[in-house]
């Protein structure tokens, strides 16, 4: 069986499409929220919670939590981030952005590791590796912004979510094209 047409590659394609579409929906609602505090707060809590659930489902679908230590750790980090965001929402926008920054660094490093580990099995992981690296850098930028004087808003997190959506969508498309090419090469 070729890489692009395996059941796990098909799962990964669907997973990447789901992650991209969730992020695009999140971004749309965040932009349309108009800074409404309750809605923005809910969105900020939902984002890392979704990441925890998505990593859990993906790890379980790819051999389980023991076989996927970076995703298992990412589930823990994203769950802890969800709790930290709930506490930060009660404190300040600066605290929220700092929490998101630390989370982006940690989850970016874990995503980078997962992409490297999956490279041989599924292909098209260069996008996830690039995404993990960029997430790490974006996290550092968010931490720097959180230490600044300009009042952060949810719109400061939208570009981070946007790049995540782009990378997940690009990975899904890349895997789809790979599977299509492999199917056409057979006959």
Image (cartoon, rainbow, N blue to C red):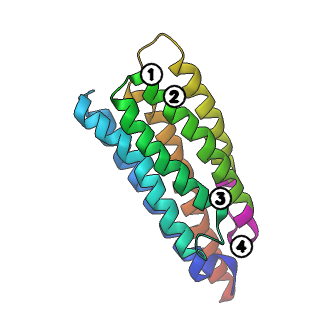
Gap between marks 4 and 2 measured at Cα: 35 Å
If you read the primary sequence from the N terminus, does the residue marked by circle 4 or circle 2 appear first? Answer: 2
Work out whether residue 120 can be spotted.
Answer: yes
Camera-near label (3 vs 4) is 3
Gap between marks 2 and 1 measured at Cα: 6 Å
The numbered disc on residue 121 is 4
If you read the primary sequence from the N terminus, does the residue marked by circle 3 or circle 4 appear first? Answer: 3
Residue sitting at x 67%, y 46%:
109
Q: Secondary structure at mark 4?
A: helix
Q: Are marks 3 and 4 in contact (CB under 8 Å)?
A: no
In the rendered image, which residue does mark 3 sit on?
Answer: 70
Q: Are marks 4 and 2 in contact (CB under 8 Å)?
A: no
Q: Position of residue 158 (x, y in %)?
A: 43, 35
Q: Are marks 2 and 3 in contact (CB under 8 Å)?
A: no
Q: Position of residue 116 (x, y in %)?
A: 74, 59
If you read the primary sequence from the N terminus, does the residue marked by circle 1 or circle 3 appear first? Answer: 3
Magenta stretch in the rendered image: 117-128
In the rendered image, which residue does mark 1 sit on?
Answer: 94
The image quadrant where one finds the N terminus is: bottom right
Could you classify mark 1 by the number of other residues whose Cα lies within 10 Å: few (under 14), some (14-19), or many (20 or more)? many
Q: Position of residue 61 (x, y in %)?
A: 53, 75
| 161 shown above or below 58 | above
Query: Residue 38 lies in what quarter of the image?
Result: top left
Could you classify mark 4 by the number of other residues whose Cα lies within 10 Å: few (under 14), some (14-19), or many (20 or more)? some
Query: Residue 176 lies in what quarter of the image?
Result: bottom right
Residue sitting at x 33%, y 41%:
43
């Amino acid at each position: 069986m070729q890489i692009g047409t395996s059941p796990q590659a098909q799962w990964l394609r669907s997973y990447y499409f789901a992650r991209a579409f969730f992020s695009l929906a999140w971004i749309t609602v965040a932009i349309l929220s108009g800074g409404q505090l309750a809605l923005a707060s809910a969105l900020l809590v939902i984002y890392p919670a979704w990441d925890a659930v998505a990593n859990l489902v993906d790890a379980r679908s790819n051999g389980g939590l023991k076989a996927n230590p970076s995703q298992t750790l990412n589930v823990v980090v994203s769950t802890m981030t969800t709790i930290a965001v709930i506490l930060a929402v009660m404190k300040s926008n600066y605290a929220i952005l700092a929490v998101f920054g630390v989370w982006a660094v940690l989850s970016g490093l874990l995503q980078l590791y997962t992409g490297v580990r999956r490279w041989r099995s599924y292909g098209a992981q260069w996008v996830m590796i690039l995404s993990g690296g960029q997430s790490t850098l974006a996290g550092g930028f968010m931490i720097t912004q959180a230490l600044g004087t300009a009042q952060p808003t949810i719109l400061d997190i939208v570009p981070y979510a946007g790049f995540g959506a782009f990378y997940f969508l690009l990975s899904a498309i890349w895997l789809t094209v790979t599977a299509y090419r492999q199917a056409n090469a057979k006959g």
